[in-house]
Amino acid sequence: ASSCAALDEATRAADDAAVEALLRDVSRHRGKHATALEALRTHADCAPHDRPPGHVGAYAPSARRARIALFHRKRAARVWTKKVKYDVRKNFADTRMRVKGRFVKKEDEDLLRDLLAVV
C-alpha cells in the first residue's frame, strides 16, 4: 500500500513530463529488476476507496494521458513492411517452381516443365 501512496503523491505533484519519465523508467526496468517494478507499480491493486477522486480506473488523469501518449508514439513507430534478411534465399525462392503456392521437388519440376511445354 505504501508504493500505491507514493505513486499517488508523485502523480498528483508531477506534471505530464515527470509522469512520462516515470513511465519510461518503469518500461526500461521491466523484467530486469522486480524490486524496481514493485516500487513503481501502479496502484491498480489498491482498494478503490484509497484512490483520490478524478482517477480513471487505476490511474490519475495525468498518468493516464502519459500512458496513452506513450502508446500512440509506440504505435506510430511500428514497422509494417516486411524486411528480407537474406537476398540469396529470396532469389532462390523466386526462381523455384510452385504449385498452389508450395515449392515443387526438383525431380518433379522437370516433369512439370515438360508437361507445361506440351500443353
Image (cartoon, grey):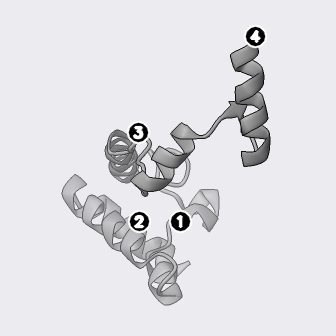
Label whose residue precedes the other's in the sequence (1 or 4): 1
Q: CA distance from mark 4 to mark 2?
A: 77 Å
Q: Are the residues at dot 4 and dot 2 in contact (C-beta closer than 8 Å)?
A: no
Q: CA distance from mark 4 to mark 3?
A: 39 Å
Which residue, given by chain and number where applicable, does mark 1 sit on? Answer: 43
Element type at mark 1: helix
**Identity, as a three-letter code, of the amino acid under mark 2:** Asp
Which residue, given by chain and number where applicable, does mark 3 sit on? Answer: 81
In this image, 101 relative to 95: left or right? right
Question: Badge 3 local density, few (<14 within 10 Å), some, or many (20+)?
Answer: few
Label whose residue precedes the other's in the sequence (3 or 2): 2
Q: Quadrant of residue 48?
A: bottom right
Which residue, given by chain and number where applicable, does mark 4 sit on? Answer: 119
Question: Badge 2 local density, few (<14 within 10 Å), some, or many (20+)?
Answer: many
Q: Are the residues at dot 4 and dot 3 in contact (C-beta closer than 8 Å)?
A: no
Which residue, given by chain and number where applicable, does mark 2 sit on? Answer: 8
Label count reads 4
**Is residue 100 in sight in this rendering?**
no
Q: CA distance from mark 3 to mark 1?
A: 38 Å
Quadrant in the picture for the N terminus = bottom right
